[in-house]
Image (tube, rainbow, N blue to C red):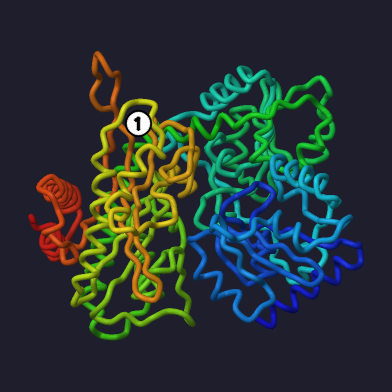
Amino acid sequence: MSTTNQHLEALRDAMRRVNVDAVIVPGTDPHHSEYVSDYWKFRDWLTGFTGSSGTAVVTLDKAALWTDSRYFIQAAMQLEGTEFELVKEHIPGEPTVEEWMQHNLELESVIGIDGRLFSCVEANALERFCGENGFMLATEFYPADLVWKDRPARPSATAYVHDEALAGETVASKLERVLGCVEDAGADAMFIASLDEIAWLFNLRGSDVEFTPVAIAFAYVSENDCSLFIDRNKVTDEVERHLKQYNVRVRDYDDVTRYLERRSEHDTVLIDPDRVSDALAAAMPCMKVYAASPIVAIKAVKNEVQIDGTRRAMERDGVALVRLFKWLEENVASGSISEVDVWTRGKQERARGENYRDDSFAMICGYRDHGAIVHYQADDESAYTLKPEGLLLIDSGGQYLDGTTDITRTVTLGNPTAQEKHDFTLVLKGHLALSRANFPAGICGVNLDLLARQPLWDENMNFMHGTGHGVGHFLSCHEGPHGIRMQINPTPLEPGMVVSNEPGLYKAGQYGIRTENLLLVVEGEKTQDYGTFYRFETLTLFPYDLNLIDLAMLTPVEIKQINDYHRTVRDRLTPFLTPDEAQWLAAKTREL
């Protein structure tokens, strides 16, 4: 707390020196990543808040932080005792960042931002806001460079090639498809800042960002010039040879601005205004086409190699989870296992599997009321010791060379109450309804979201996070453009897309419940009168906790669905288990 306030005062001293009245500090990097390397975690350093989503605003006498419902409880705990006020996003009566500044700033106030961290869309919106309210916007105020004295170094790990046998497509093929879309948009080149897009396009991976296998880089692609801007020490001989065969030139990461400044005014460059920073877009003197990156939509539809790889990764992931939960069940009564120990053991079990590289995010292991903190992350100070009673929520995933996994299971450690079973079954009913959805081509995630929420809505309950997010292939665990949520997203679900199915229920101070599988969109029936229908294939392989199911709440259709799924889990995983592990799984997948 005192450290946070010291950091806050250091920032204010820097603001006073250059006559800046307010600073907006996002929790992102120049690549607009969801998860960022330590080098760019200035918001975390400033506020003490470590969630993946959040924006801070600091004036000379006030400070506030905005975050979404996943982090309300966590933010309240981490900001306690500091000057920062927590503002809850998307909650009626809570001010937006702009409304808060309108209330707290005087006319002609100067708002400072690091323009490298704001997309074209965000910077333009701020320009309009300032113009309409009599404020001034300074886009070259770099607070991290000024006050973060012990700033970590930029990541230096080497990049590596993602084998075509696992990626399922060559770099040449990807470049051809992407440049075809660029031409269709009326441009002859494209500038790319998003790390996952660059990793996908060049079949490269890295370890610069925790849990996401990417290397920090920029890219510029056209018919005549494909350039990758990356720190030279990241480029191994293998990577150099790999890029050279596709005529990709390696340039220094810090040369990107100078390179863009030299673009001909006759060039026309496609820029995704939501994914490229205002500072880099402004550096280009050429014509620009502002349009959504075609890479996002292309890589969201997985090819058959990626799909088969993900299925195999799910089998290895399921085996690791059998071993983790079996160990947990057999040892919880010892009173020696903490929430942190579960994550450590989970990593160990996944690491035993072929092609494992890392977890796909920090495990959420929430016992009792910690489970109600949607994105809770245990540490040695906060971690509970587990006991043979109460609910435990474990949300975890793995990064494998052939696929990315993400699964949540809520289990009872003993003596479940009638209310716990009732709530668990409500969440499960929504989860099952979405899993068995059959829907016509052209349907978007928002059209299906109701299926997962209806059992909760029927009892005047809800969850505030999305029901489902897209998932990458050995890339970002959270991937667009599709998703399943209450908010409108016009992206239709297409065969080859992977999306999570994770309804939940959170009772602060009591427990949290979430059940999550990954689903693959596949083709269903083709009808003469109504066109093609799609359905879901469940990719995740691990049982639901039968001890938490209230059978009286389930329909015959739902009971059959659970039994069929558990039979698949048993059939797919048993060949990889020891006899003792197979016996444990057989008991957990017994027929209802």
Q: Name the residue located 33 percent from the left edge and 38 percent from the top edge.
A: 520
Quarter occupied by the C terminus: bottom left
Q: Name the residue located 42 percent from the left edge and 79 percent from the top edge.
A: 383
Q: Which residue is mark 1?
A: 304
**Can the viewer see residue 69 in this picture?**
yes
Q: Name the residue located 89 percent from the left edge and 55 percent from the top edge.
A: 108
- Picture layout, residue 555 above or below residue 267: below
Q: Secondary structure at mark 1?
A: helix
In the rendered picture of this protein, how many numbered marks are placed on residues? Answer: 1
**Name of the residue lying farthest toward the bottom:** 335
Q: Nearer the viewer, residue 285 or 239?
A: 285
- Give the image location of residue 392, x and y in percent: 31, 71
Quarter occupied by the N terminus: bottom right
- Give the image location of residue 338, x and y in percent: 37, 79
**Can the viewer see residue 339 in this picture?**
no
- Picture layout, residue 405 above or below residue 121: below
Residue kind at label 1, given as amino acid type: Glu
